[in-house]
Image (cartoon, rainbow, N blue to C red):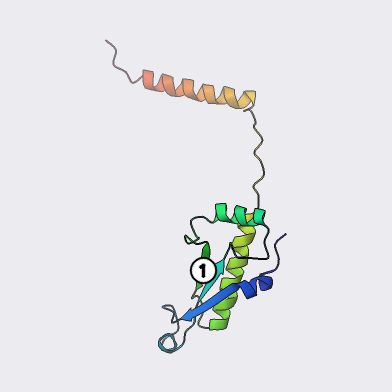
């Protein structure tokens, strides 16, 4: 079970900078872009098994030292961007901890096999009729 996003706040470092998105003159003055930094391996809220699972699933999004970086610059407000990036962070953790259902091997039905073979036979006859007779 994953703790709520607010529980991770002591482990998260937020950094702000000027955004490149909407905002007119506001963009040039206000640091509305929010960057979230979270060190996976130093987290005290997750078990070692959860950390390993996240490490495998998010391998492409983590830095070499296990740091997760997420950025939000969707809104003009720094506070709103902070909420957005925190929600993304929590959703990312939830998705990475979800285990896929094991696939059950199945066989195609007899009618499906018959239809497929009939289709192949028709296609073969169509191509055979195009050949030149010698």
Left or right relative to 6: residue 15: left
Identity of the residue drawn at 29% across and 12% down: 133
- Tell me the residue at 43%/78% (across/down): 21
Looking at the image, the residue that sits furthest to the left is 134
Which image quadrant is residue 23 in? Answer: bottom left
Quarter of image, res 85? bottom right
What count of labels does the image hold? Answer: 1
Residue 33, how many percent across, how many down?
48, 78
Near mark 1 (Cα within 10 A), the count class, few <14, some 14-19 or many ≥20, is: some
Q: Residue furthest right?
A: 1
Q: The C terminus appears in which quarter of the rendering?
A: top left
Q: Provide the secondary structure element on which disc 1 rests.
A: strand
Question: Where the N terminus falls, by quadrant?
Answer: bottom right
Vertical position of residue 81 compared to residue 107: above or below: below
- Horizontal arrangement in the rendering, residue 116 relative to residue 94 (left or right): left
Q: Where is residue 114 in the image (x, y as percent from the top left)?
A: 58, 22
Which residue position holds label 1? Answer: 70
Residue closest to the eye, 81 or 121: 81
Foreground pick, 66 / 34: 66
Residue 49 placed where, x, y %? Answer: 66, 53
The x and y percentages for residue 52 are: 61, 53
At horizontal 67% and vertical 73% (from top left) the residue drawn is: 6
């Amino acid at each position: 079970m994953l703790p709520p996003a607010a529980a991770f706040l002591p482990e998260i470092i937020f950094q702000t900078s000027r955004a490149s998105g909407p905002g007119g003159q506001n963009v040039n003055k206000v640091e509305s872009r929010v960057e979230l930094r979270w060190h996976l391996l130093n987290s005290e809220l997750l078990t070692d098994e959860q950390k390993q699972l996240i490490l495998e699933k998010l391998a492409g999004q983590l830095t070499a030292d296990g740091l997760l970086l997420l950025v939000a610059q969707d809104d003009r407000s720094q506070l709103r961007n902070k909420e957005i990036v925190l929600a993304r962070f929590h959703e990312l953790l939830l998705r990475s901890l979800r285990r896929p259902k094991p696939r059950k091997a199945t066989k195609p039905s007899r009618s499906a096999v018959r239809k497929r073979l009939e289709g192949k036979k028709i296609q073969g006859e169509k191509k055979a009729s195009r050949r030149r007779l010698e």
